[in-house]
Amino acid sequence: MEQMNIGENILRLRREHRITQEVLADFVGVTKASVSKWETNQSKPDILLLPQLAAFFGVTVDELLGYEPQLSKEQIQKLYRELAEDFTRLELEQVEEKIDAYVNRYYSCYPFLFQVCILWLNHYMLAQEPEKQAELLKRIQKLCGRIQEGSRDSRLCGDAAMLSAMVSMYLGKPQELITILEEERNPGRLSQQGDALLTSAYLMKGDLEKARSFSQISMYLNLGNLLGNASRYLAACAGELPVIRETVRRIGRVTEEYRLVKLMPNNVAGFAYQAALSFLAFEEKEEALGQLKIYMACLRELLKEQGLLLHGDDYFDRLEHWIQRLDSGAEAPRDRKSVLRDMAASLDAPAFAPLGEDKIFRQLKTELREILHFS
């Protein structure tokens, strides 16, 4: 918890409202000298004046005092799991009220607010009406703005800015995201070389364990990013079958060599699903079915006891400490029931209609129903 700095807060609030010490002094019935002493921490305002000062600035007494109720990382993770599960057993409006109550209670716990943003991003589509979905997405951007304005954690503020930009795209405003990220994510910028530089610094210092651990983390994350970018590349090259085939071939090699079906089944499933859709656009049914078989293998992995948890393997054996330090821990962004619900409908998409009478496709759908029934 941060220290209470009422003097600094009064000074900051007064300047934000562009008022003089005399105006504030007249409002609360003290001298200008008293206000000056408060702001320089030579004295504190009488406790009976706190509600009046808070009302004047339009803040709570806690905010005036600088008291920021904080949740521990473990408490945030527990709340996230609880709320994610609520989406499967309560009406959306009930979950919304519960989340709002927690947000109001921990409005200055910025890591928690960020996890609420992630929670909404992973569940906003449960709203039936497009207008409600847009409302929930705008709520994310509002909370991201709160984080950027109030948090002193530059990393968290950067993540909030990135998340807000992502929401702009979901809201049908891609230009906002482009404006924010086009230059920032330029591959030629030195900031993109940070991972390699840090690993090199560890090696130069002789800290081989940190160099090994950080290299693993970076490789692991880059593999996940590769799969996500490859999925989007397929969509961008929708009219070029040779490019689609070559992309699938290369990603298939990477997937096999790094055993990604077991390591990150959710990422591989997303790529295989997109690849199947891309092949079907050219009526390449056999290749589409091949990708759907990989998709089903990933679903089987996901439904295992630890399948939804972030994890390493016998090669990526230095991830555990990093995973434990994540605000969300090893937990998946959505609970098991939500994932099962999405799986159940995945092969019913209209795009798979050309496979409707195919024997292998019918077998895959039957297998999916059986897997879900016993999960």
Image (cartoon, rainbow, N blue to C red):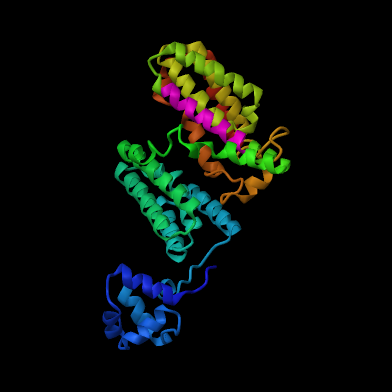
- Above or below residue 254? Residue 310 is below
Left or right: residue 345 compared with residue 14: right
Instruction: Report which quarter residue 196 is drawn in.
Output: top right
Q: Nearer the viewer, residue 105 or 26?
A: 26
Looking at the image, which residue is at 49% across and 47% down? 88
Residue 310 x/y as whole percent: 62, 41
Looking at the image, which residue is at 54% across and 31% down? 267
- Above or below residue 315? Residue 25 is below
Task: Label the magenta part by its dominant secondary structure.
Answer: helix
Q: Which residues are magenta?
A: 217-235
- Above or below residue 17? Residue 358 is above
Q: Nearer the viewer, residue 302 or 77?
A: 77
Looking at the image, which residue is at 63% across and 45% down? 323
Looking at the image, which residue is at 51% across and 49% down? 84
Q: Is residue 116 magenta?
A: no
Instruction: Report which quarter residue 71 is drawn in.
Output: bottom right
Q: Is residue 228 magenta?
A: yes
Q: Nearer the viewer, residue 72 or 283?
A: 72
Left or right: residue 316 compared with residue 83: right
Instruction: Report which quarter residue 203 is drawn in.
Output: top right
